[in-house]
Structures are given as C-alpha cells and as structure tokens.
C-alpha cells in the first residue's frame, strides 16, 4: 500500500489478495488518515471486487477531503 498526500487530498494505491473469499466478492476498505498529532484528518472507503484466491487485485482510492500532513494511516476490511 502506498499513500501520497498533496494539495488535492490523499491518494492510496495498493493490492488486495483474498486467501479465503471467492472471486467476484466485493470488500470495502475503510482508510483513516492521521496527522502528526495523531488526530484523524479524514476517512474514505473504497470498494474492491476480489480476483481469484491468492491473486492480487489492484485498487486506488482518492480522498480529496483529507487536508494537512498525513503522518500515518490505518485501514479496516469489511466483507
């Protein structure tokens, strides 16, 4: 996963790999972006349709509402 922050918000690119869910199943990734002080700068969801098991599925998320310096991030996977 790579996170880039700029004037237009934050962009996340990465790959999801299913170890147990079937191909074609959608999952939602909820990203939370944190500032240098640990406070939440914003959150954004991205829906990804899974590829075959053990196969990478690329995704990209744009979070235009995230402003400020992104010092960290975390995510939660929802099925």
Image (cartoon, helix red, strand yellow):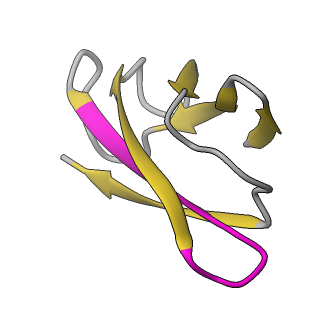
Q: Residue at x 32, y 47 (%)?
A: 20
Q: Residue at x 78, y 76 (%)?
A: 36
Q: Is residue 73 left or right of residue 25?
A: right
Q: Is residue 72 left or right of residue 21?
A: right
Q: Quadrant of the N terminus?
A: top right
Asked where in the image residue 5 lies, by quadrant, the reply is: top right
What secondary structure do most residues of the magenta stretch adopt? strand
Range shown magenta:
27-39
Percent from the top left, x then y, of residue 53?
43, 31
Reply above or below: 39 against 18.
below
Residue nearest the observer in this picture, 75 or 17: 75
Residue nearest the observer in this picture, 7 or 46: 7
Q: Residue at x 27, y 36 (%)?
A: 27
Q: How many marks?
A: 0
Q: Residue at x 53, y 26 (%)?
A: 61
The question of residue 37 being in magenta is answered with yes
Q: Is residue 9 left or right of residue 75?
A: right
Residue nearest the observer in this picture, 56 or 3: 3
Percent from the top left, x then y, of residue 70?
75, 57
Q: Is residue 18 left or right of residue 56?
A: left
Reply above or below: 38 against 26.
below
Q: Residue furthest bottom?
A: 37
Percent from the top left, x then y, of residue 10?
67, 35
The question of residue 12 being in magenta is answered with no
Reply above or below: 60 against 63.
above
Percent from the top left, x then y, of residue 68?
72, 52
Asked where in the image residue 28 lies, by quadrant, the reply is: top left
């Amino acid at each position: 996963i790579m996170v880039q922050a700029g004037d237009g918000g934050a962009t996340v690119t990465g790959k999801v790999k299913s170890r147990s869910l079937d191909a074609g199943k959608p999952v939602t990734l909820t990203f939370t972006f944190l500032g240098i002080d640990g406070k939440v700068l914003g959150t954004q969801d991205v829906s990804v349709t899974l590829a075959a098991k053990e196969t990478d599925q690329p995704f990209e998320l744009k979070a235009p509402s995230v402003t400020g310096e992104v010092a960290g991030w975390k995510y939660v996977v929802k099925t």
